[in-house]
Image (spheres, helix red, strand yellow):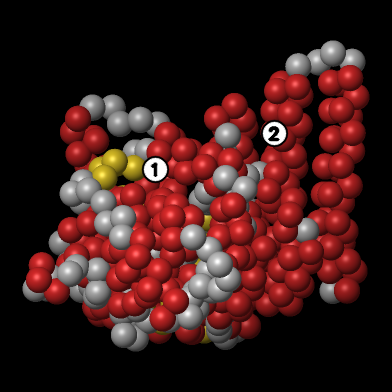
């Protein structure tokens, strides 16, 4: 196990050395007369390909970071977008599979030596492999088709070590997603992903969502069939990931309308779940929503779920309303009264920093697309004061998590290219967002 850990660390440590070598080689090519933009694009594309290949092979915390970054591919500069999209998308739904002997050993450890008697059928070939485990299709003893999620052996030991190592090299990710605060992402992931290792906790959260959303016309939450610390069995759903819609434009108006309906369901689920069940699905990832043939969405994977027993904090939604409505003075008064800002930062700077989150809340219907999201990324990179403003904001961890989840889904919806009535959903489900005179009854 120690040798494996050292090998994993060596792979991560090799990245800055390789990236540095490419930078020197690129400088030599520019001195020899090569076009600067072409050299830069080629170098960064190779960096991305190697970075995500290494992260994907390592699984654990390393692959978790790669998947978190893959959500933000709309921030990547246009001139190198395609190589990044290809490298990033591989981490949104795939990873190296666990050997069959390890699968059967884990099942015996978690479900008992007679685990096979609990299934009529079990497919040894996984249907998906992710950061901490993989999923197999099977038939339960009572005839139900089920998804069997099995944690990788040693994932618990590798996860924290990976995240500690990655924190040391967080600056590398600026070469993939310019302007992204990768250190903050690593720190937040390290804080919450250890909870994902206990599948019994995940099963409890999935049961809570299933009970709260039972009977929903547009959303399906698969029911839990059985659970153990490292194995989770739930009902199987047949569908196509939301990420598949991001790979091509809508063929016609009917398909575009379908995308808009699906996106509406995503946003309403995110906004309403804290109020309905006291939980927020905190893993913005297109693979966590499956589009079904009947136009419903299935929400899966409840490993990363934030507890918000009182719903989204009203003070945060009030701040978002001030941002959306372009009200810098009341926004700053509230931020200072709550102790959410430190130092001498101008109101307009804060409004500009949070403006991207507020854009979809300013109009009745907002169009999410890559051009809009890429403009947000360009603004962050261009404005050197943006990072200073970000450091001045001292929002509590659960507030930051809500903002991170919203930002992640804005990036995903931009990839899908869709239009959603976000403001109306916010007024309905987010306490404190709608002014008292216009607040709607639920």
Q: How many discs appear?
A: 2
213 or 44: nearer the viewer: 44
In the picture, which quadrant includes the N terminus? Answer: bottom right
Label 2: how many residues lie within 10 Å, few (<14), some (14-19) or many (20+)? many
**Quadrant assignment, res 40:** top right
Numbered disc 1: secondary structure: helix
Q: Residue at x 40, y 69 (%)?
A: 332
Where does the image place residue 36, in percent across and percent down from the top left? 75, 22
In-image side of 366 versus 285 (left or right): left
- Alpha-carbon span between mark 1 and mark 2: 22 Å
In-image side of 280 versus 51 (left or right): left
Q: Where 323 falls versus 15 (above or below)?
A: below
Give the residue number, with chain letter if any, for mark 1: 414
248 or 34: nearer the viewer: 34
Instruction: Answer with mark 1 or mark 2, whichever residue precedes in sequence.
Output: 2
Res 45 label: 2
Q: Are discs 1 and 2 less than 8 Å apart at CB?
A: no
In the picture, which quadrant includes the C terminus? Answer: bottom left
Numbered disc 2: secondary structure: helix
69 or 212: nearer the viewer: 69
């Amino acid at each position: 196990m120690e040798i494996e850990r050292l090998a994993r660390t060596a792979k991560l440590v090799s990245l800055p050395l390789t990236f540095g070598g490419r930078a020197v080689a690129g400088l030599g090519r520019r001195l020899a007369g090569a076009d600067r933009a072409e050299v830069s694009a080629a170098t960064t594309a190779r960096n991305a390909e190697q970075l995500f290949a290494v992260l994907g092979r390592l699984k654990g915390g390393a692959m978790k970071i790669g998947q978190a970054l893959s959500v933000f591919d709309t921030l990547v500069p246009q001139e190198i977008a395609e190589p990044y999209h290809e490298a990033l998308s591989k981490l949104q739904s795939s990873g190296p599979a666990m050997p069959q002997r390890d699968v059967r050993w884990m099942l015996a450890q978690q479900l008992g030596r007679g685990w096979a008697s609990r299934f009529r059928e079990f497919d040894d070939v996984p249907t998906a492999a992710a950061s901490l485990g993989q999923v197999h299709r099977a038939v339960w003893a009572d005839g139900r088709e089920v998804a069997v999620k099995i944690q990788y052996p040693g994932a618990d030991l590798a996860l924290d070590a990976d995240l500690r190592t990655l924190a040391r090299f967080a600056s590398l990710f600026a070469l993939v997603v310019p302007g992204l605060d990768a250190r903050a992402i690593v720190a937040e992931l390290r804080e919450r992903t250890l909870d994902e290792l206990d599948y019994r906790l995940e099963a409890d959260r999935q049961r809570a969502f299933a009970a709260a959303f039972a009977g929903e016309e547009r959303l399906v939450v698969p029911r839990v069939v059985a659970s153990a610390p490292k194995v989770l069995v739930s009902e199987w759903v047949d569908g196509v990931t939301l990420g598949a819609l991001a790979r091509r434009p809508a063929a016609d108006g009917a398909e575009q309308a379908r995308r808009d309906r699906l996106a509406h369901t995503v946003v309403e689920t995110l906004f309403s779940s804290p109020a309905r069940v006291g939980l927020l699905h905190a893993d913005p990832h297109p693979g966590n929503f499956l589009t079904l043939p009947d136009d419903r969405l299935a929400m899966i994977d409840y490993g990363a779920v934030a507890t918000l027993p009182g719903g989204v904090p009203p003070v945060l939604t009030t701040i978002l309303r001030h941002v959306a409505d372009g009200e810098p003075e009341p926004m700053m008064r509230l931020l200072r009264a709550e102790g959410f800002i430190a130092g001498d930062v101008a109101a307009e700077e804060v409004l500009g920093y949070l403006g991207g989150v507020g854009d979809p809340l300013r109009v009745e219907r907002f169009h999410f697309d890559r051009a809009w999201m890429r403009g947000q990324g360009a603004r962050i990179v261009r404005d050197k004061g943006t990072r200073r403003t970000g450091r001045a904001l001292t929002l509590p961890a659960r507030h930051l998590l809500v903002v991170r989840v919203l930002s992640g889904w804005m990036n995903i919806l931009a990839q899908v290219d869709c239009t959603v009535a976000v403001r109306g959903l916010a007024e309905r489900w987010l306490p404190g967002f709608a002014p008292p005179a216009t607040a709607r009854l639920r």
